[in-house]
Image (cartoon, coloured by chain):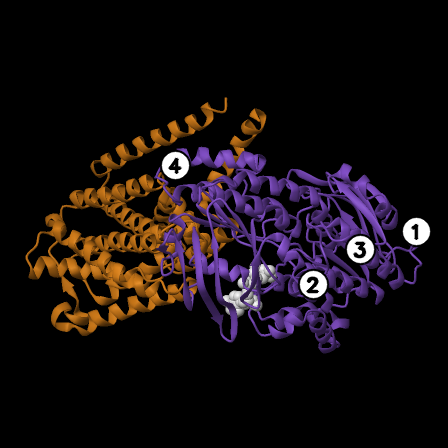
Amino acid sequence: MTSSAPARWRFLGTATGIIAVAALAALPFLVDAYMLHWAITVLKFAVLTLAWDILARTGQVSFGHAAFFGLGAYVAVLASSTLGLGQILSMLVAGVVAAGLATCLSALFFRVRGIYFAILTLAFAEVLKVCATMLTGMTGGAMGLSARPLFGGDAVKSYFFILILALFTIATMWLLSRTRYHFGITAMRSSPEVAAAFGIPVVPIRTIAYSVSAGLTGVVGAFYAFYTTYINPESAFDVAISVAPVIMSIFGGLYSIAGGIIGAVTLTLLQEYLRTTFEYGSLIVYGLLLIVSILFMPKGVWGLVSGLASRQRSPAREVAS
Amino acid sequence: MLRIRNLSKSFGGVRAVDNVSFDVPLGAIVALIGPNGAGKTSTFNLISGLLPPDSGSVTLFDKPLTGKSPDEICRAGVARTFQISQLFETLSIRENIQTAALFGRSTRDDVQAAARRSDELVEAFDLGSHANALPKDLTFAQRRNVEIARALVMDPQILLLDEVLAGLTASEIEEAIAIVERVKSPTVGILLVEHQMRAVMRLADSVVVMMNGGVLMQGSPEEVRKHPKVLSAYLGEEIDASGSHIATRSEEALSLNSTADGGGRSVSAAAEPVLSIRNLSAGYGPLTALHGIDIDVGDNELVALIGSNGMGKSTTLKAISGLLVPLAGKVHFEGRDVTHLPAHSIVRLGLGQVPEGRQLFQYMSVEDNLMLGAAFVAQAWGARRERLDEIFALFPRLAERRSQRAGSLSGGEQQMVAIGRALMARPRLLMLDEPTIGLAPIVVAETFEAISRIKAAGVSVLLVEQNVGWALRVADRVYVMESGKIVLAEKAENLWANREFLQSFGLG
Ligand SMILES: Nc1ncnc2c1ncn2[C@@H]1O[C@H](COP(=O)(O)OP(=O)(O)OP(=O)(O)O)[C@@H](O)[C@H]1O
Ligand SMILES: [Mg+2]
């Protein structure tokens, strides 16, 4: 009885995963251009949210991931226009540069914790925005830069690029969750000092988490630049880019892959639905919905769902023991 | 062998650790004792790399540990427990132990093997029914067992145990001694900080006595217990080779108490008890921890509630003070039904509490913590200055530390603040949950004298205490609790005369 219960859940999970991937692969051939655009946007936010969550799991909350998003956007556009690199290569370079910057920053930023760290990241994103505005020679200043459309404007190819990036992110996080680093990261979140006293290499783990998180965000920023074909400091370093993954994670469920995906999908589509439904005040409705959901689902949608599922499972466990 | 040489550390003006040198050889148990705030835990923090020393060195098999990060030191084979338990609150009990298993010395990334190792320890420490619970749902004693298990699972060469026996009853201490004896092996060196002299006398091969940051002396348990300075500054009274107090003094303390209330001991609770509990039941979620208990505390009476750990004593106090909503039964305080009043209203009526495990406001100063005890109690706020002076007279150590952040105090100093904070409210009835946990023997004696004085000043006291000897000496009446029920209610002097009887409750 009891041995088959987890097996059943695992089977259910695997089956859902396979069906979901198949459906996602078929999607661009089934929907129109407008829907495809929204699918791309959803995936973009899913990667942003999961990437942000990688750092959050270590106990540090960033309010400035727009720094890496914007940096990625500019690096990619400049790499392809001035160095003549291909677009895919440019996006990868953007990711590497963003990750490298995070590695350097971690020595400085991780001296502080909690709200102080959050403010540092927020301020840093603003600094980069100002830099992008001032360095007119390179970035075009407030006028921004334009880029050649991604894959020559082929939306289906763009879709597959961001889909593969999302699957790569999910796979990485899932594999990680099966190693000891998952335990180390969760322990660090309670207390880095105590975690270190139990042999957990806190500083390297935190630095790597920040770099991976920033690198993925940088690639998404680069993707955004080529996909929209135009960037300026306001759009690339938009505070909304920093805030979106925080809200989506909390709404969907912090520290979980499923939670991040649920948050990104639901809130991206909800925002678009409200925007087209209400002529005025769609943001007010959106805000109210968020407030209510956070008050009544403090662990997010996924926390609620998995909580109910485990309650359903627990009687079986009691009978067995 | 762990070698400590000329280790020093200051915090501002306080020399917490001052030129300390000693060795911990493999196969040996070294005890580190000394008054509260002597620098024992700070020494642990310096060894485990949590604090950088100002000067001095620590080496393990001649390889320097100083300058390494805490995780490197841990992987080199040094494991520790924390005096104030520091579990990973977001991980289950099993995962807490498993995490340590995954990162300790010579461990590899084998999550399954680590799970098996931690399950063994979960069983060994009798935590099976809580393996999937979060630390916040455990009792004080269970949390500490997880602390020990988490250090043991790392298979350390040097094991640092910081007051792991605090708050245990006599028979639980015996069990714990047996555990440590089992851990003892030629390949492990154990450094043990402990105020439980019974364990120190039995376990230690060598004892290091610290005082004011420095090493006062090092010697065998025999030498240490006879050293006049150790006697006067730490033990406060003579103990025999088994770590028990020498009986004469105990009789004295008992007579001290009977004179304090004019010899007229109340036979049972007075006609109008200050606190009366009838048929009280309480629990946590599906688990019922209290099964319909009755307790009375008379006017100016000191009532002790004793029993092994996990029997429901703390739950009783929580249910009385409104921190836990009772399932059934009534609590009357000075004739008034307070069963369903919120905790803060009950405090304002004059029912003060020293909760288990201190629960100070870590980021506030000592003085602010104390002031807070009186801040929301109208009758106490006016007299707060005098009260503060009284508390500083009771615990002079706190006067020296008045503007220090409470979270950075030593464990014993924190306990003093917790007692002081409850007294600030000038309660009518004071409930104390293991008030002397982690206090040096001499301070334990002083605290019980203080509690007797508090009672002499007209306050009724309900005391939960693991140290049965002391409980019997200061109390008027005693309730014995077992598995959530009151199994015995008796006058303290009668129980004192028949102490052996208590052994049947595991309290001998
Ligand atoms: N971070 C800190 N800042 C200021 N003072 C500190 C700090 N940490 C410890 N101290 C002080 O250093 C002294 C030694 O503290 P320590 O915790 O080592 O004592 P201890 O011997 O373990 O005492 P106990 O038996 O009460 O646990 C104490 O007086 C304490 O107040
Ligand atoms: Mg200590």
- Give percent across and percent down for residue B476: 85, 54
Numbered circle sitting on residue B419:
2
Pinpoint the chain carrying mark 3.
B
Numbered circle sitting on residue B250:
3
Q: CA distance from mark 3 to mark 1?
A: 22 Å
Q: Secondary structure at mark 2?
A: helix
Q: CA distance from mark 1 to mark 2?
A: 28 Å
- Give percent across and percent down for residue A150: 14, 51
Q: CA distance from mark 3 to mark 2?
A: 23 Å
Q: CA distance from mark 4 to mark 2?
A: 44 Å
Pointer 4: what residue? B111
Q: Is residue A46 left or right of residue B10?
A: left
Identify which residue is drawn at 57% across, 68% down. Answer: B212
- Give percent across and percent down for residue B37: 58, 65
| Letter of the chain shown purple in the rendering | B
- Give percent across and percent down for residue B302: 83, 56
Q: Who is closer to the viewer here, B27 or A125?
A: B27
| Residue type, numbered disc 3 | Ser
Numbered circle sitting on residue B267:
1
Pinpoint the chain carrying mark 4.
B
Pointer 3 local density, CA inside 10 Å: few below 14, some 14–19, many at least 20? some
Q: Are marks 4 and 2 on the same chain?
A: yes
Numbered circle sitting on residue B373:
none
Q: Is residue A205 left or right of residue A1?
A: left
Q: Secondary structure at mark 1?
A: loop
